Amino acid sequence: MFRAFVCFILLALPAGAQEPRVPQSPAEISLSFAPLVKQAAPGVVNIYARRIVDARSPFADDPVFGNLFREFQSRPRVQNSLGSGVILSADGIVVTNYHVVGQATDIHVVLNDRREYDAEILLADEESDLAIMRLAGASDMPHLTLRDSDTVEVGELVLAIGNPFGVGQTVSSGIVSGLARSGTATGNARGYFIQTDAPINPGNSGGALIDVAGQLIGVNTSILTRSGGSNGIGFAIPSALVAQFVEQAQEGHRRFQRPWAGMIGQPVNAELSDSLGLTVPGGVVIAELRPGSPFDSAGLQVGDVVVRVDRAPVNTPAEMLFRMSVRGIGRAAEVIYIRQGQEKIALVDMIAPPESPPRDTIDLGELSMLPGLRIARTNPAVIAELGLPHDAEGVVVLDPGPYGGQVGLLTGDRVLGINGRRIDAPRDVDQMLRGGGGRIQFEVLRGNRRLLLRFRA
């Protein structure tokens, strides 16, 4: 009777299913991750970074109290950081987090087999919290292959490999517990993450999140915690974005170029969906649109609801920016949007933020009251570099210089006027500060705050 029951089960197997077989190795018998770890671990490295930082007084940037506390500023000090990285090519291309190596003066990388290399940063981006490096003199490096993160599904088994707390390389296991996580930024990182319950701890940053085939699906970047320990909510930057970083680094870019949208959007909630005539909340409604921007040129209008970019659903501006960034500069993205209840399709060109109008950068010389001050005209490229509001106009401070910093100017300040005279172009600032002396009053816009900065030349 037992033999007949077994025959029935074998005959009931669906077409194409693999027949039962005897385990072929000790690893299969014990259901161990050991072969997978042995394959992937050599491609994950430990990173030791050293940077010089200024320990500044909390009053340093205050226009009133800054000068009073200037004598109490601390001297520059050395700051060391510890993290992980992933080798992505045989010639030593390594990806890690920006917060591990950003602004580092010395970067030392130690492989799983204890070989050591110095590394240089090829491309780094604080907003995405990613950095691409190259190991000096490296060849025939063990490395991981990238899997398209768009094929990852919730529930997949994953391993996190890194160097938590500096104890040495360790491995933790879990599953993919969420996708398309946005609004979970830590520090300056903004974006779109894979969520996992594989334990991630300090030092795991920049390490690998791999699937059961040993392919890289994400770079571990942060955890959500109240205690400082791993509570089973960790986030990894998807491999699709990592691939774009590697591509741009190999093309020689020093800064990551994001496609320019030239628009402001907001998520569609239940209340907004009713007013827009949508049956289900979802998508991103265009609230503002800059004339001549790619979305404007493709025929989209204010009030249109973007629901898909390259066939992937988008429900937040962060998801839209991620999809555009993954598509890459120089290509076109298929955008599906809804206008008055009708679904429409447009091809939107992915272009870099344009230098139009020209920025007309000016460095004030020795004859100026603020020598070393660097200013420029605001344009989409400047807005992207400094993180200014999408509709910013006028003249902006690129670098306050030694004297501009003393009077309270900061990078990103928009100069509205000097001594009551409106400023429209960089040359206006140069003319107002050239020669002479007396009292000077700057009217600047810092974020959403209007400030008056006064000094005597």
Image (cartoon, grey):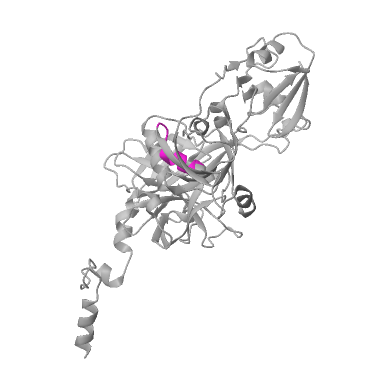
Indicate whether 213 appears above or below 363. Answer: below
In the image, 82: left or right of 424?
left
Q: Residue 255: where, in percent of width, then height? A: 47, 32
In the image, 457: left or right of 47?
right
Whether the magenta-drawn stretch holds residue 223 is answered as no
Q: Residue 370: where, in percent of width, then height? A: 68, 17
Asked whether 457 or 388 is in front, the reply is 388
Q: Which region of the structure is painted magenta?
A: 321-330
The image quadrant of residue 159 is bottom left
Q: Quadrant of the C terminus?
A: top right
Q: Residue 194: where, in percent of width, then height? A: 47, 53
Q: Quadrant of the N terminus?
A: bottom left
Q: Residue 57: where, in percent of width, then height? A: 70, 37
Residue drawn at the location 36% of the way across and 49% of the way down:
148
Asked whether 60 or 77 is in front, the reply is 60
Asked whether 415 or 373 is in front, the reply is 415
> Is residue 158 visible to us here?
yes
